[in-house]
Image (cartoon, grey):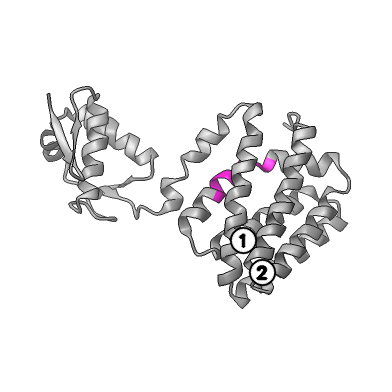
Amino acid sequence: MTTARSNGVEVELGGMSQTDVVVYRIKKMILDGELAPGGKLPIEKDLAPRLGVSRSSLREGVRALSIMGVLETRQGAGMFVTALDASLLLAPMGFVVDLQQPSGVQHVHSVRRVLETDAAAEAAMRISDADLADAGRILDAAEEAIANVDHDAVLDADMKFHKLIAIASGNPVLAALIEALSSRTVRGRMWRAISDEHADAATAHEHRAILRALADHDPIAAQVRMANHLLEVESFLQDRPPIDLE
């Protein structure tokens, strides 16, 4: 039985497919520092025997790691480790969220609320004057779109506002998780805007309250304001699940 040691733990490879072995061993090369972010992999004819797999299995494993955001192909140059940025590595999570059944959408919104309330608290302690000014301009654009009954523009501004706060938290992993979830809750937010004529105005009011808490650098107020805002969306969707908007 073939085994490998990772972080002091023996891992049994005999039950793995050759593709899984490729994924495991390349990951181990990265964790051991043999391959650094941006580093180039050995050429296929050298790497396959080194990993103990066929060249076709190596290609399958490399494809899987590319989908995960771990590897990237550069035309004419070869295969490289990506920057291993959190936004790349967590992007596939959005696919998992996409596959949730309608009954699971409420859970996605709940997780988003937990993450974004923490991000708002962190952002309140770190946000710059420049980011506060940008946030104000985003909300100005949203309110103009509300006046013009432009739901798409309102939703676009909504996403920009929440993304700005997530980034301002200073935690790139938290921001990447929020991005993956936020883009998957658009349908529910659009449904609320279309079916409740007061929803956009209520959202604008809630966003202004969040911005005031951020400008005051008050993490508790920012956390509470964000939680209240997102709970409003959750409560609405619990009572009135979205229909197909296609």
Q: Is residue 55 left or right of residue 204?
A: left
- Can residue 186 be seen in the rendering of this structure? yes
| Figure quadrant of residue 5 | top left
Q: To which quarter of the image does residue 226 belong?
A: bottom right
Return the x and y of residue 170 as percentages of the image width and height: 50, 64
Residue type, numbered disc 1: Ala
Instruction: Report if the CB atoms under discs 1 and 2 are less than 8 Å apart.
Output: yes
Main SS of residues in magenta: helix
* Residue range corresponding to the magenta coloring: 178-186
Instruction: Give the residue drawn at x 56%, y 50%.
Output: 178
In this orientation, which residue lies closer to the viewer: 133 or 32? 32
Which amino acid, mark 2?
Answer: Leu
Is residue 120 one of those drawn in magenta?
A: no
Which of the two discs, 1 and 2, labels the residue nearer the N terminus?
Answer: 1
Answer whether residue 183 is magenta in the image: yes
User: What residue is shown with label 2?
Assistant: 214
* Residue 156 visible to the viewer: no
Residue 246 lies, in percent from the top left, at: 72, 31
| Residue at 73 percent of width and 69 percent of height | 212
**Residue 164 percent coordinates (x, y):** 60, 62
Q: Quadrant of the N terminus?
A: top left
Q: Determine whether the residue tagged by mark 2 lies in a helix, strand or loop.
A: helix
Residue 213: % across, % down: 70, 68
Q: Residue at x 32, y 35 (%)?
A: 63
Label drawn at residue 100: none
Classed neighbour count for the residue bearing mark 1: other residues with Cα under 10 Å, few (<14), some (14–19), many (≥20):
many
Tell me the residue that label 1 is attached to. 120
